[in-house]
Image: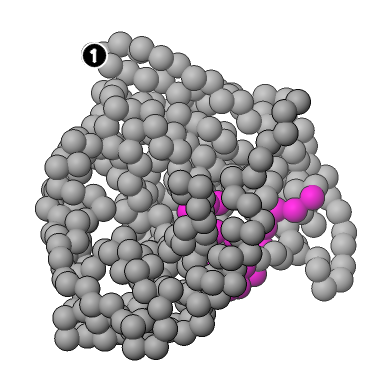
Amino acid sequence: MAEQQPAVSADQAKAVLSGIATTAVSQPVTVKVGDASAEASAAAIAKSLTFQVKDGQLRPVVDGAALHASLGPALEKVDTAAKDARWDVSSGKPVLVPAQPGNGVTDDHVADSVISVLDKQGDDRRVEMPLGPLAPKLSTEDAASLNITEKVSSFTQKFPYAAYRYQNIGMAPKKVNNTLLTPGDVFSMNSKVGERTKANGFTTGFVVGEGGRFREDMGGGVSTAATTLWTAAFYAGLERVEQGSHLIWISRYRPGLEATVAWGQLDLKFRNDSPSGLLITTKMTKTALTVTMWGTKQYDEVKAVSGPKQNVKAFTKEEASGPSCVPQGGVPGFSIDVDRIFMKGGQQVKKQTYTTSYIPAAAV
């Protein structure tokens, strides 16, 4: 096997380390944009700076987005952010609101300008950048091409009010509202909502634990959001990627048509397998959550047809005590099939069967 030579020699690397790599992070860089002036600190430069091999040499590369963000507060008076195209659904129909360009400096401009003075010292570490147009991430033309023209599905899940439920369930619609899925995109509830921790805005509540027994844990109640999202996706005809039900049947949910999530163990994922974009909006009250999906219907109707409960198992009665004991009513176990029927032109064009099994939960 032929010996492979390194892209740059050790001497070259040492020269860069003792030269520009050291000088680059030795002092701040003053950035002037219009009437505003900001300082890129040595620490901010160090965090955004890497070196890459180009044309046989180690060249400095700056993460313009990170460095630009560090300058943000000082440039706010001259930077006008671009506004993405969006949809107004307040009338019950999606109306495209055009994008608006912004005015300021781009991330690439920040990176290139700062790189140009990284090998300098003192007063020479100053750059002046002119204002220029900033393009929105989603242009009016790109948004229009997604063909979001009508309500595809909507589902409302009611729940009994409790302070922890309102807080935990409410975190999901805040983070999910106005989520846009382009064709082929996969929605992940865990990725979108984040880990259920106090730092992320969640509190303790009741969850279904081992053996179907209720216990307290962080994020209890968030499965109501998972159920609402999955049911709306079900009726929108979207492809199921990952979905799981509770261990036991909870009576406010339709058997076999509900979902739960557990961080690091179970996610709710569905794919936008339609040729158009899909906009997800949410609306919440103290006792109900509604998820609506907007796009272009691929089917005239998507129906859920439930079969009979099978393999029914009676629940038992148990006695328990202690601070962690939570009284609960008994629930029988059973399995059930739910058929998803896709209708077009008055005909069934596709059917998918989802089988769910619930264990019995003892009365405590």
Question: What amino acid type should be assigned to the residue bearing mark 1?
Answer: Gly
Q: What element carries label 1?
A: loop
Rendering quarter of residue 242: top right
Where's the C terminus, which quadrant? bottom right
Residue pictured at 56% horizontal, 25% vertical = 354
User: Which span is picked out in magenta?
Assistant: 189-210
Considering only vertical position in the picture, is 88 above or below 152?
below
Q: Name the residue under label 1.
A: 345
Q: Nearer the viewer, residue 60 or 34?
A: 60
Q: Which of 194 and 84 is in front in this view?
A: 84
Task: Give the tally of numbered discs.
Answer: 1
Q: Position of residue 110 (x, y in %)?
A: 31, 68
Residue 286 in view here: no
The residue lying furthest to the front in this view is 11
Q: Which of 163 and 236 is in front in this view?
A: 236
Rendering quarter of residue 295: top left
Q: Position of residue 176 (x, y in %)?
A: 40, 55
Q: Is residue 70 left or right of residue 346?
A: right
Considering only vertical position in the picture, is 362 above or below 71?
above
Residue pictured at 28% horizontal, 16% vertical = 344
Residue pictured at 17% horizontal, 86% vertical = 35
Q: In this view, does 299 lie to the left or right of 353?
A: left
Q: Where is residue 128 in the image (x, y as percent from the top left)?
A: 23, 77
